[in-house]
Amino acid sequence: MAKDKKYFVLREGGADTSQVFASAQPRGAALKAASRGKTNIRLRERGTNRVHVFVGERKQVPKPENGPDWLPDMVWKANVKKQGIEHLG
């Protein structure tokens, strides 16, 4: 049985944005946000009052040895670290 996707809404300035990331786990959604250059990542899980807080970064690294030919020589690699969970109101 495949894991169900959850939807996580990116929060900035204390309010929801229009960016939504789909993933089974909050970390997967945070990695997607980090790959787009976000560093202070707050993701509200849809349907709940939980906000998952991450610190993210992305670095340019050489492409993997077994990477396809169309992939550029340098690629972005995202990394996140969970800081905790906050509960809204």
Image (cartoon, rainbow, N blue to C red):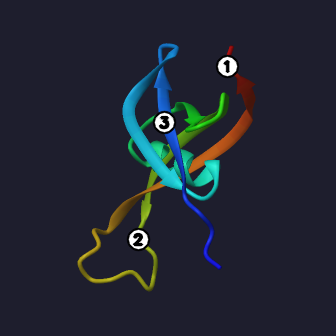
C-alpha gap between disc 2 and disc 1: 40 Å
Image point (44%, 86%), residue name: 66
Position of 13 with respect to 73 (left or right) is: right
Q: Image quarter for residue 52?
A: top right
Q: Amino acid at mark 3?
A: Val
Counting residues from the start of the chain, the first of labels 2 and 1 encountered is 2
> Tag 1's secondary structure?
loop
Quarter of the N terminus within the rendering: bottom right
Residue that mark 1 sits on: 88
The answer to which of 47 and 17 lies nearer the viewer is 47
Q: Residues within 10 Å of mark 2 (few under 14, many from 20)?
A: some
Mark 3 surroundings within 10 Å by alpha-carbon count, few (fewer than 14), some (14 through 19), many (20 or more): many
Mark 2 or 3, nearer chain start: 3
In the picture of the structure, the residue carrying the numbered disc 2 is 63
Q: Is residue 60 above or below residue 84?
A: below
Amino acid carrying mark 2 in the image: Lys
Seen in the image, is 86 located left or right of residue 66?
A: right
Classify mark 3: helix, strand or loop: strand
How far apart, in angstroms, are the residues tagged by discs 3 and 1? Answer: 13 Å
Residue 47 appears at what percent x and percent y? Answer: 59, 37
Residue at (45, 47) in percent of width and height: 21
User: What x and y, as percent, mark residue 38?
Assistant: 45, 35
What amino acid is found at the position of numbered circle 1 in the picture? Leu
Q: Which mark is residue 9?
A: 3
- Give the answer, above or below, for where 36 lies relative to 65: above
Residue beneath the point at 72% across and 25% down? 86
Label total for image: 3
